[in-house]
Amino acid sequence: MSEEMTPEDSARSILERLREGGLWQPAGLGLSYVREAGQTVKLIEQENNPTSAQARIRMRILIEGLGWSVDESDVKLVDVEHLSPQERHIQEMMLRQEMAQSWKCKCGTPLSAFPLEKGKWTFDGQQDMALPDGSTEKVEQWSVVITCPVCDAKIPTEPYDYGLLAGDDAMLDYNTGKVEYKALSRPEIIRQIDEKLTDEVLILGTFCPFNGDLLPPHVRGSVVTFYVENGGEEE
């Protein structure tokens, strides 16, 4: 039984993983931080309510206690009380996507200009994750390696960040290098069944049924069509 992760440990882990230009929105606090150069985060938005105002003070003390700096020179107060949960989620996603457009390679090329469809999903092993009861469990760690079209630098990105850059469609296709899978929408699944084309459809599990490769979590459980290289369409 390991000790429960403290707020300091959790914040340090998040800050160290956050890329320059990356967005951090601590859950339930109504605060939005962006990492700047070095060990500095900038508070760019705060929900206009007493709860977020108090959380802002606590977070500054927490972050500065870890040896980081907090820039609060240009904070936008946002009124969200009139927004539905769905509207707030859409607003947050728009902000995250806007921040993703500012991410750049060391040569200055925007990551959004990379050939993102060629990103390579890579299994990076397992890591212990602390649970609320103080115990730990093993969780898979994945990254998507994207290649700069200008300097050929290979940049590993977290799956969530990759989704922000590449869009939802990129999360529907997956290529193992030997087998290409394409997730089907509900209407497409219905059409496949109605037209008795189920031999061309698979439901994916943990491993690729053709070569045994471990599949990334986002495609497991998907209903897909598939294409095997050098073999044409499978029956």
Image (tube, rainbow, N blue to C red):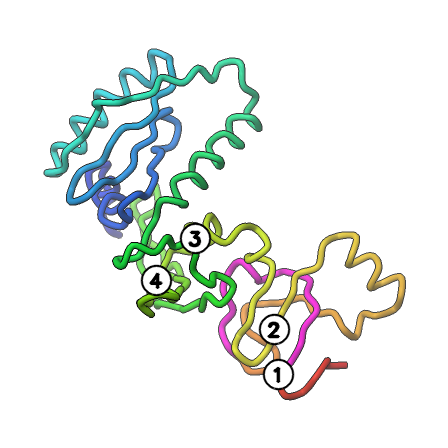
How far apart, in angstroms, are the residues tagged by discs 3 and 2?
23 Å
Q: What's under tag 3, amino acid-wise?
A: Ser
Q: In front of the other: label 1 or label 3?
A: 3
What secondary structure is marked by label 3? helix
Which mark is first along the chain, 4 or 1? 4
Q: Secondary structure at mark 2?
A: strand
Tell me if mark 4 has few (under 14), some (14-19) or many (20+) residues whose alpha carbon lies within 10 angstroms of its own: some
CB atoms of marks 1 and 4 within 8 Å: no
At 24% from the left and 47% from the top, the residue drawn is 13
Which x, y percent locates residue 205? 59, 67
Residue at 38 percent of width and 19 percent of height: 47
Q: Is residue 192 above or below residue 95?
A: below
Q: CA distance from mark 4 to mark 2?
A: 21 Å
Q: Residue at x 19, y 43 (%)?
A: 37
Decide whether residue 215 is among the magenta residues. yes
Amino acid type shown at disc 1? Glu
- Tell me if label 1 and label 3 are in contact, CB under 8 Å: no
Q: CA distance from mark 4 to mark 3?
A: 14 Å
| Percent coordinates x, y for residue 77 in the rendering | 36, 17
- Provide the residue designation for mark 1: 229
Instruction: Return the disc, 3 or 2, that comes first in the chain's sequence.
Output: 3
Q: Earlier in the sequence, mark 1 or mark 2?
A: 2
- Callout 2 amino acid: Glu
Marks 1,2: beta carbons within 8 A? yes
Q: Nearer the viewer, residue 86 or 111?
A: 111
Identify the mark at residue 180; answer none if there is no mark: 2
- Residue under pointer 3: 112
Residue range highlighted in magenta: 213-228
* Residue under numbered circle 4: 156
**Where does residue 99 sit, x and y in percent of width and height?**
38, 40
Separation of disc 1 and disc 3 at Cα? 28 Å
Gap between marks 1 and 4, in whole Å?
Answer: 26 Å
